[in-house]
Amino acid sequence: MQAIWKIISSKAEAEPVFSGGEHVRPLIVVRSPRARQMRLIVSPSDGNVRLTIPRRAALAEAQRWAESKRSWVEAQLAALPEPQPIRPGMTLPLAGASVTLDWSEHYPRKPRKSGSVVQVGGPLDTLAGRVLRWLKAEAKIVLEAESRELSRRLGVTLGRVGVGDPVSRWGSCSPSGDLRYSWRLILAPASVRRATVAHEVAHRVHMNHGPHFHALVAELLGDDPAPSRRWLRTHGAKLHWFGRSP
């Protein structure tokens, strides 16, 4: 099957480059057979500047149009959250608490949480990758435990529970009962994480977003989930910048 999305320009010299705040991004141009007009977006999760154009649109004209939107694009880039690279001594949110990343060459390579400190050793140039893998593993443990606890209370079965790094959703539930979450929920307040879990587990009863579904989410959570949804709308983009370098 022919891919719907096709990148048609990858040469840096052919692309306008936009700069705003700490973010510098080339224009990414894609053709879509479904597009009826040009559409320019700045992704809040990674800062990519993407121009979608109809299949037969002229590339040069499309690039000129994107260039005419430079002030808007660069304002959007400047408004993005700052990257949060992983560095020794940083404070990071973990399952609703703040912990400090304590690196020493005398510690084991694998991160280990001790109270409010995460101890980790190994080479500094691979520190970020090891911390991210550890966070993803911790996220899976916490999210699976909370999902299965709520499923037992609700009297429903679950399939597999996994984590990934999607940019457009925080969780999903398949018709067969598999749940999948963004691992970055481990960086969110505990109430936000639990509200997301309640949302996905409730889909095992209602595969829709009707009134009965929302009532069940509130019942499982024991609270109003609306503040948690607002938190994700307001602060969720910042979670995607954790672990990214400038």
Image (cartoon, helix red, strand yellow):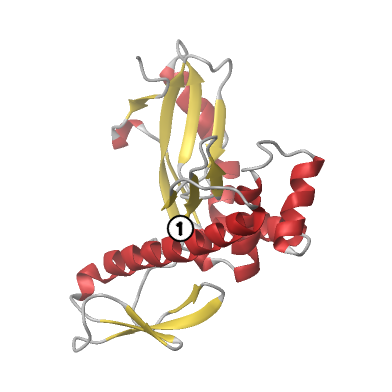
> Does residue 177 appear in this view?
yes
Give the quadrant of residue 3.
top left
Relative vertical location of residue 106 with respect to residue 123 in this rendering, above or below: below
134 left or right of 203? left
Disc tally is 1
Residue at x-position 37% and y-position 34%: 15
Q: Residue 8 in the image: state x and y as whole percent.
A: 35, 23
State which quarter of the image contains the C terminus. bottom left
139 left or right of 146? left
Amino acid on which the number 1 mark rests in the picture: Trp
* Nearest the eye: 210 or 49: 210
> Does residue 81 appear in this view?
no
Give the quadrant of residue 147.
bottom right
Q: Residue 243 in the image: state x and y as whole percent.
A: 39, 64
Q: Residue 142 in the image: state x and y as whole percent.
A: 48, 66
Q: Residue 211 in the image: state x and y as whole percent.
A: 81, 42
Q: Which residue is identified by label 1?
A: 183
State which quarter of the image contains the N terminus. top left
In this view, the residue farthest toward the front is 155
* Nearest the eye: 240 or 203: 203
Residue at x-position 59% and y-position 50%: 75
Residue at x-position 57% and y-position 36%: 69
